[in-house]
Image (spheres, rainbow, N blue to C red):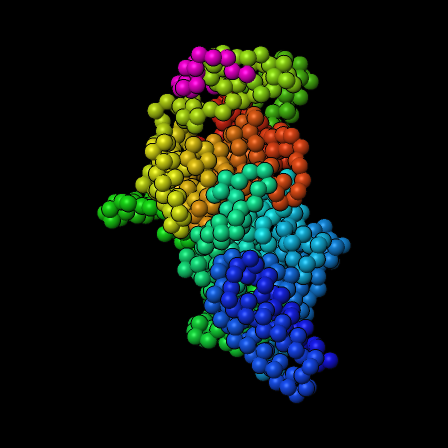
Amino acid sequence: MDIEKRIQELRDRLKYILDIFGPDENANVAMLEAKLGEYVAREPGLAKQEAIRQLETLEELFKFLEKKLERELTPMNKVRIVRHPQRICLKDILENVYDNYTEIGGQDDYSIDPSMLIARAYITRRRGKKVHNQAVMVIGQEKGHGQEFRNGGSVKPWGNAKALHYMKVAETENIPIHTYIFTPGSYPIEDYPGAAQQIAKNLYEMAGLKVPIVAVISEGGSGGAEAIGLADTRIMMSHGYYSVISPEGAAAIEGRLRGGQRAEAKLIEHCAQQLKITADDNRANGYIDWKINEPELGARPEHYDFFRKLRKSVISSTDEIVLNVSGLRLFRSIALKRHKGADVYVRWSLNSRAKERLLWTRYMKFRRMAQHAYLDKRHWFSRGSEWTGELFSSLYSYFRYDLFGKQHKKVTELAEDVHAEMQVVVGRSTRLWNAIVSRLSFGKVKKDVDKAGLTSLSVWDDGAQNSGKWQYVSPQAKLDRAVPCPNAAVHGCLDQWAPDLFGEWAGVCSFCGHHFPMEYQWYLHNIFDPGSIYELFTEIESTNPLKFEGFDLKLDEAKRKTGHKCGCMTFEARIEGTTVMVAMFMGAFRGGSVGAAEGEKFIRAMERARKKQLPFLSYVHGTAGIRIQEGVNGVIQMPRCTMAVRRYTEAGGLYLVLYDTNSYAGPVASFLGCSPYQFAVRSANIGFAGPGVIKETTGLDIPPNYHNAFQALSRGHIQGIWDRREIRGNLVQSLQTMGGRNLYYR
C-alpha cells in the first residue's frame, strides 16, 4: 500500500507539471512521463525491495527535474501556476499563517459574494514569558481549490463593498489590514453599486485609511487587484503575476480577434513575455517592495515551510510600516532591516501624529512610481527652473492659504457669527418698537421686501447659452450630404443636412436629441472663454517603457495625427471669468487610453489646482481604459491619480467629471469614478467593460443601451446628463453652487 500511495503522489505531481506546461513541448516533462509509465508497467513483477529501490530512484529523478523545470518557467507557465486548483488559497493562508481567525461578513456560499473573504485574525508573538496577541483584519479574494461558487476569485461590486466596509472597521479599531490578491479581475457588472464605481470608491477610501496596509499578490488582474491593492507595502509571491490585462486578453487585442475567436498559443506566450508581469519584472520597475520565494513550481497547501516564510514576511512588513512613522524606533528599525523577521516587539496601533505621517508616506510612495515610464526631454536647467518655481509656488500657497488664509477664515467666521447674533438682537428690538408704535397709532409701519436678499443662483442665465454662433465649427459641417440618425427607426427622425447638423446644431439631432460624436477641439473653443486657454506640462511625452513590439510606430502615428505628445491635455482656462484647471482625455490619441505620461500630467495638474485653490474639471472625450502596452506602468496610474484626487478634495477643491462618447475600464474605476460630481453628455456610454469583454467573461448577452448615460444615471453612477449646447451654462452653474468655500472665487 505504501508503494501504491507513493506512485499516486508521483502521478499527481506529473499531472500538475503537465497542467503547468500545457501544450508546450518539453523534453524533461516527456522524460518524467515516460519513466513513470515504465515503472508502473514493471512494478508488479519486481521484488518488494527492488520495487522500493527503483521507486526511490524515480522520486529523486522527479526532484531533480522539478528543480530544472523551475529554471525553465516562462511568464505564461507562472500564469498557469496561479490559476491551478492546487495553488494555495486564502483559506490555506488563514489556517497556516495566523494563529486564530473568525470569518466575518458571510461564510462560504452563504455570503453576499463568496469570492471576497474577510476574517478577523490574530498573530501571537512571544516575548520572554509574555504573550502578545496582535489583531489584524485579513481581506482577500478567495478562489478555493476549484470551488465553483467562488467564481474564480472574480469579485462582484458588492464583494468589494464588503471589503471596504471591513477596512473602515479596521480603521475604527486601529488595527492593521492584510490583503491577499488572488483575482484574474473584477466581475464586469454595472448593477448598483457598479464594478467601476465601487473599485474607484475602494481606492479613494484606501488612500486615506489611517492604519498600516500590507498587500500580498499571487494573481493580480488589473482593476480587480487594485480594489484592495493600494498598500503601504506590496509583497509578491515569486510565481505570481501582476498585470494590466490577462495574456489572453492582450493577445485578443493585438490579434484583432472578434466574435469569440481564440488567440494562438504562441501569440499568448508572446504577450505574456511583453507585458512584464512576473514578480522580478514588477520588482525591477518598483511596483512591489519585495518578493517571497516559493518552492519549486509554486506553493501548494502541503508546503508548510512557505507558510512560515509568509508569516515572517507579513509580520516584519507590518512592523516596518509602523516603525517608519513612529517615534521611538531607531534600534528596532535597524534590527528589522538587517534581519528580516527579527524578534522585536512593535505595537501595531498608531497615535494621531503617526497616522498623519503614514498618509504622507503612502502618498509619496505612489507618487514616485512610474517616473521612468514617460519622456521628459527638457534640459536640466529647465527642470531646475520648474523645481524652483514649484518651490516658490508651494511657499506662496502655504503663506496665502494655509497660514494667513486660515486666520482670515477664523476672523471671517467670527465676524459672521457676531453679525448673526447682532441681527437677532436688532430684529427683536425692531419688532418691539414697531409693536409699540403700531399700538399707539403714531403711524403706519412700512413693510418692504428685501429683494436683494433673494438668491439669483437658480435663475437661468440665457446669456450663458450660445444661440448657435459657435467659435469652432466641426469639419463635418463641410460635407454636402444628408446624415441619418441612429434612432430614426424608434423616433422617426428625418435625415439632416450635415452643414446644419454639425454647424448650428452642434452635432445634436433636432428630433430626438441624439449627440453625434464631435472633435475635442469643439469643446476647447466653445466651452471656455476665447483666448483663455493656457496649456501646461507639454513636455511630458508618452513612450514605450516595455519595448512592446510595434508600439513605437503606433505612438508616433498618434502623435503625428493629433499634434500632441500624449492622450491627456492639461490647461488652465476661464469660464465666464472663473479660472479652472482642466485635464482633457482625447479619444483621438490611442482611444484616450491612460499610460504613465497621462497619469503624470493629471497628477501635476491636480497638485497645481490644489496649490492655487482652483476648481478642477476632467473632460473625458473618450477613454478605452488603461494602455495595455505599458503593462503595470499603466495600471499603477489608478491608485496614483486617485491619491492625488483625494489630497485635492480633502483640501476643499471642487472636482468635476464630464464624460463624452465612450468611457470604460481603469480610469472610470479610479480617478474619474471617485468624483462626487460626475456628469455625462447625452448619448455617452459609461462602464467598466465593453459588451465584448462582458460576453467573453460572463457568457451573458447584455441588453441594448446597457452602458448608456441614462442607465448610468438611474444606477446613481453619475449625477446628471447635459446637452452639448448647454455645457458652458451648466459649468457656470456648477462653479457657483458646488464645492467648498475655500476656492479662490468664493
Indicate whether residue 53 is drawn in magenta. Answer: no
Q: Does the image show residue 222? A: no
Q: Residue 560's image quarter?
A: top left
Q: Going by the picture, which residue comes out furthest to the right?
A: 110
In the rendered image, residue 374, in percent from the top left (x then y), is placed at: 36, 47
Placement of 631 over or under 310, stated as above or below: above
Q: Residue 190's image quarter?
A: top right
Relative side of 394 to 430, left or right: left
**Residue at 43% across, 37% down:** 590
Question: For the image shown, how many numbered marks are present on the structure?
Answer: 0
In the rendered image, residue 171, in percent from the top left (x then y), is placed at: 60, 57
Q: Does the image show residue 260? A: yes
**Residue at 37% across, 31% down:** 562
In the rendered image, residue 609, in percent from the top left (x then y), is placed at: 42, 39
Span highlighted in magenta in the image: 464-484
Q: Nearer the viewer, residue 395 or 495?
A: 495
In the rendered image, residue 708, in percent from the top left (x then y), is placed at: 60, 30
Placement of 460 over or under 735, stated as above or below: above
Indicate whether residue 465 is drawn in magenta. Answer: yes
Main secondary structure found in the magenta portion: loop
Q: Nearer the viewer, residue 496 or 263?
A: 263
**Residue at 69% across, 54% down:** 150
